[in-house]
Image (tube, helix red, strand yellow):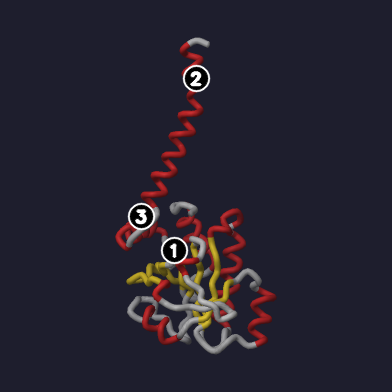
Amino acid sequence: MNEETSKTSKLPLWLIIFTTLAVMVSGFLLFPSNDGQRDRLLSILGTNNRGTLLNPVVVMADMPLTDQEGEAWLWQEQAPKWRLLLPFAGTCENACRDFLYTSRQVHIRLDKKTQRVKRVFLNLGAPLDDEMNAYLKREHPYLTVVRGDLAEFSALIGPTNAQWTIDNSRLFLVDQQGVAMMYYTPENDGSDLLGDLKHLIKYSPEL
C-alpha cells in the first residue's frame, strides 16, 4: 500500500472523529446550563419565535407536585425532555381542551422527534372527576397528569408576563432542565407551537 492510498484509507476515520467532536462541542455550547446561556439561546432563536418568551423564566422544580396516586413527582427526577405544560383549575372547558388537542396533534407531527417532548397536564384544583379521567384516558392516553397547589403556582407565575389566571389559559414550554421559558395563548395555533418546537429541538442536544 503506497502513502497516498494509506492517507485515503484513513480519511473516513478522521471525518468520523471530527464529526463526533463537532457534535459534542456544539451540544455543550448550545445546551443552556444557566439563565445567561438560556437567554443567549433564545436570542439566537428568537427572531422566528411564534410563542412569547416568558419573562422572567420560572424554575418548575420550585413547585411541589404529585402524580395521580399522590406520590411526589419531581421535575429533577424526570428524563430530560422538552415539556408542554398545561396548568388548569376548575373545569377544563373550551380553551383547556383546545390546548390539549393542539398539543397532542403537534406532538404527533413531530414524527421521529416525538420522544424529545412530553406533555404535562397540571391540575391545580380538586381531584379530576370520573368524566374528566375518562376523557383524558380516551383522548390523551400518553398525557402525564400531575397535581399542584393553585396558590403556589400563582406565586411562581404571577411575577411573569404570562398573565395566567384560572380563566386566562396558557400553554407553557418547559426546557430539558425543567425551566418554563415560553408560553402560548389561545390565539396561537398549532403551527406556531410546532415551528418553535422543531427549532428548539434542532438546536438543543438530546440528553
Q: Nearer the viewer, mark 3 or mark 1?
A: 1
Give the spatial CA distance, label 3 vs label 1.
Answer: 16 Å
Point out the residue furthest to the front here. 71
- The location of residue 72, given as percent across then percent down, is 51, 76
Residue identifier under label 2: 8
Point out the residue furthest to the top here. 2
Identify the residue at image location x=57%, y=64%: 106
- The location of residue 162, given as percent across then percent down, is 39, 76
Along the viewing direction, whichever of 130 and 62 lies nearer the viewer = 62
Q: Residues within 10 Å of mark 1 (few under 14, many from 20)?
A: many
Circles 2, 1 touching at the beta carbon (< 8 Å): no
Residue identifier under label 3: 44
Identify the residue at image location x=33%, y=79%: 159
Q: Residues within 10 Å of mark 2 (few under 14, many from 20)?
A: few
**Quadrant of the image occupied by residue 204:** bottom left
Along the viewing direction, whichever of 19 and 203 lies nearer the viewer = 19
Is residue 50 shown to the viewer in this render?
no
Identify the residue at image location x=58%, y=63%: 107
Horizontal arrangement in the rendering, residue 96 relative to residue 166 (left or right): right
Q: Secondary structure at mark 2?
A: helix
Q: Amino acid at mark 2?
A: Thr
Identify the residue at image location x=47%, y=77%: 170
Is 28 placed above or below 38 here? above
Horizontal arrangement in the rendering, residue 67 relative to residue 168 (left or right): right
The disc label shown at residue 124, or none? none
Q: Earlier in the sequence, mark 3 or mark 2?
A: 2
Q: Amino acid at mark 3?
A: Ile
Residue identifier under label 1: 175
